[in-house]
Image (tube, coloured by chain):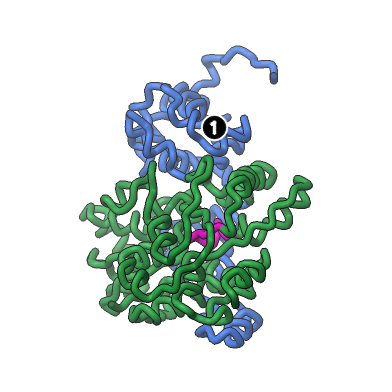
Amino acid sequence: MKYALFLGCTVPVRTMGYELSTRAVMKKLGIELVDLKEFGCCGFPLESIDHDTYLSVATRNLAIAEEHGLPIMTMCSACNGSLLKAHMAMNDEKIKSHINDTLTPLKRHYNGSIEVKHAARVLYENIETIKEMATPLPLKIAAHYGCHYTKPSEIYEGFEDPEVPYSLDDVIRAVGAEPVQYENKKQCCGGAILGIDESVSLEMTREKLQHVKKTGADAMTLVCPFCDIMYDVNQRRIESHFDEKFGIPVLFLPQLVGLALGIPSDELGLRLNRVPVRSLLKTLGD
Amino acid sequence: MEKKEPIDMNDLDPSFKYEIASQPGGEHIMKCVQCATCSSGCPVASISDKFNPRRIIRMAILGLKERVITEDFVWYCAACYTCSERCPQDVRIPDLMSAIRNIATKEGHIHPAYKEQGRLIGEMGRLYEVTDFENQRRKKLGLPQLKEKNDEIDSIYTKTGVKKVIT
């Protein structure tokens, strides 16, 4: 299988460990990733500003993938939702022709043929291979699904259950770890309103860290750079803001899978994680 | 609790709900039955009383346009889609909030955080600047180089007219 890897804005600049581990794990699983330099922003922040501009910016990326005849793999859940929603909107011929008009000066055109998949979904679909290749990890892991990986469910057409999500827990089991359950598991990370009201946003993040802490999990795992910025990058800030200690390591799902597949921690970008993962690696005998 | 004044009927704009309904994402506003399923499961509302989706919809249907588009509460929706999955009337609240934000933007009330994001994306083609520094860092990690600038989004902005509202 071959995908065009859609980097988006945040992953290639702020969460390079996610990119490194995704590339390393996909390679190990025999999935080829192609870089298309013309990809740009997915359009997600623009949906709030002007709907036509959002659709045009998102569809531009779909058109580029179509020129190369490749399905898209995203790492960011917001990118995934944004591109998929635009793809669905193009089912309406009137909207499609209107958006293609906007793209004409760029010499781009979208016919509507591109499949968009989240990297975590691709891992889930390769769960049997992962099981065969994995050295079991003796860890307790709390899955954080976030929002756009499962919702709005209408764009995912039967993949995942937005009320009782399962795919990340299944991948955790596939690598021999134990998925821990916790209160308010589906809660949003709060990242979307960090620029609107920082204290409300950080309080949302803090609540989940408290719930995960109670379970005694060795780490959290997640599949979106925004969520990572809230739980990993901002964890120390939240600790000092609320005078509370968490110290919960946060792994991107491909980092967790990569450890089980025996990929060296350097290739998984683990030293880029903000909350130290040393104790975790010690547990694994690294 | 903040003291409330009676609503003056002269302040209402009865056409506001139709304006919202004609905007992509706002089509389902009139289906709302005020059951509050959205507000009761909202992760933002559970922390802050600044955001209450049911109240925003009620205000919009009532025609309190000025307050809805000038105050910042409509920008508090995290677009997590929890309410959207549960709404018995299929109101699609996060899309509805986007529709209202689009109207607010058109009328000069875009939230400064979104204005800045819109500007950056237009100028660079992405939300974060990519300079030599980022590309050097990526090179050290063995990651491919990124294109520093992308003019195509700016050209889309010109065509859709959004450039005027974010500069």
In the rendered structure, the answer to whether residue A278 lies left or right of residue A118 reads right
In the rendered structure, the answer to whether residue A56 lies left or right of residue A142 reads left
Q: Residue A210: image x %, image y %?
A: 64, 45
- Which colour denotes chain A? green
Quarter of the rendering occupied by the N terminus of chain A: bottom left
**Nearest the eye: B149 or B12:** B149
Label 1 sits on what residue type?
Val
- Furthest toward the top, the residue is B6
Q: Residue A170: image x %, image y %?
A: 38, 57
Examine the image and state in which quarter residue A37 appears: bottom left
Q: Is residue A2 above or below residue B40?
A: below
Q: Is residue A209 above or below residue A282?
A: above
**Nearest the eye: A242 or B88:** A242
**Nearest the eye: A16 or B9:** A16
Under circle 1, the secondary element is helix
Categorize mark 1 by other alpha carbons within 10 Å: few (<14), some (14-19), many (20+). Answer: some
Q: Residue A257: image x %, image y %?
A: 45, 70
Given the image, what chain letter belongs to the residue carrying mark 1? Answer: B
What residue is drawn where x is 46% and y is 53%? A145
What's drawn in magenta, residue-wise?
Answer: A220-228
What residue is drawn where x is 58% and y is 52%? A191
Which residue in the protein does label 1 denote?
A: B68
The answer to whether residue B158 of the structure is visible from this angle is: no
What residue is drawn where x is 45% and y is 25%? B36
Quarter of the rendering occupied by the C terminus of chain A: bottom right
Q: Is residue A169 above or below residue A18?
A: above
Residue A268 in magenta? Answer: no
In the rendered structure, the answer to whether residue A216 lies left or right of residue B33 reads right
What residue is drawn where x is 38% and y is 22%? B33
Examine the image and state in which quarter residue B135 appears: bottom right
Q: Which chain is blue?
A: B
**Nearest the eye: A277 or A177:** A177
